[in-house]
Amino acid sequence: GHLCPKTSDLVCMTIFADVILPMAAVLPRFMTKKTVVVCSGVLENRYDEVRAAIEAAGLQITGLQTMNDWCCFTAQKGE
């Protein structure tokens, strides 16, 4: 089956790192250069691991905010 039949301008992932990690590799398939990915619900102590998976998928972190022990970040396709 297909997760999404075409690309999207916005992808929101408000879920734990254990779900984001395996999905990171397939994200670029559904993205254009203008697509923004918003990930939140990531514990601060897991951010580096999630960031590495996002970057390994060819995405670039474009913003980061933290509150207490939680992170929210944005990403787009790299150059």
Image: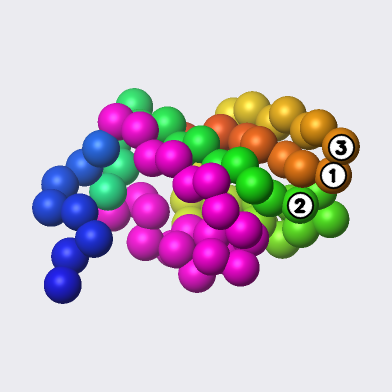
Q: Give the amino acid at mark 3.
A: Asn
Q: Closer to the camera, 11 or 29?
A: 11
Camera sees residue 77: no
Camera sees residue 13: yes
* Lower sequence index among marks 1 and 2: 2
**Which residue is label 2 attached to?**
43
**Which residue is label 3 attached to?**
68
SS for callout 2: strand
Which quadrant is the C terminus positioned in?
Answer: top left
Q: Closer to the camera, 51 or 1?
A: 1
* Lower sequence index among marks 2 and 3: 2
Range drawn in magenta? 9-29
Q: Is residue 24 magenta?
A: yes
Q: Locate residue 60, reporting x and y percent.
A: 55, 40
SS for callout 1: loop
**Which residue is label 1 attached to?**
69
Q: Residues within 10 Å of mark 3 (few under 14, many from 20)?
A: few
Q: Is residue 16 magenta?
A: yes
Instruction: Answer left or right for 50 relative to 54.
Output: right
Q: Locate residue 66, reporting x and y percent.
A: 78, 33
Proximity of marks 1 and 3: CB atoms separated by less than 8 Å:
yes
- Residue 41, compared with residue 53, is above or below; it is above
Q: Give the amino acid at mark 2.
A: Leu
Question: Which quadrant of the structure image shows residue 53?
Answer: bottom right
The structure residue drawn at horizontal position 38% and vertical position 54%, both measured from the top left corner, is: 27
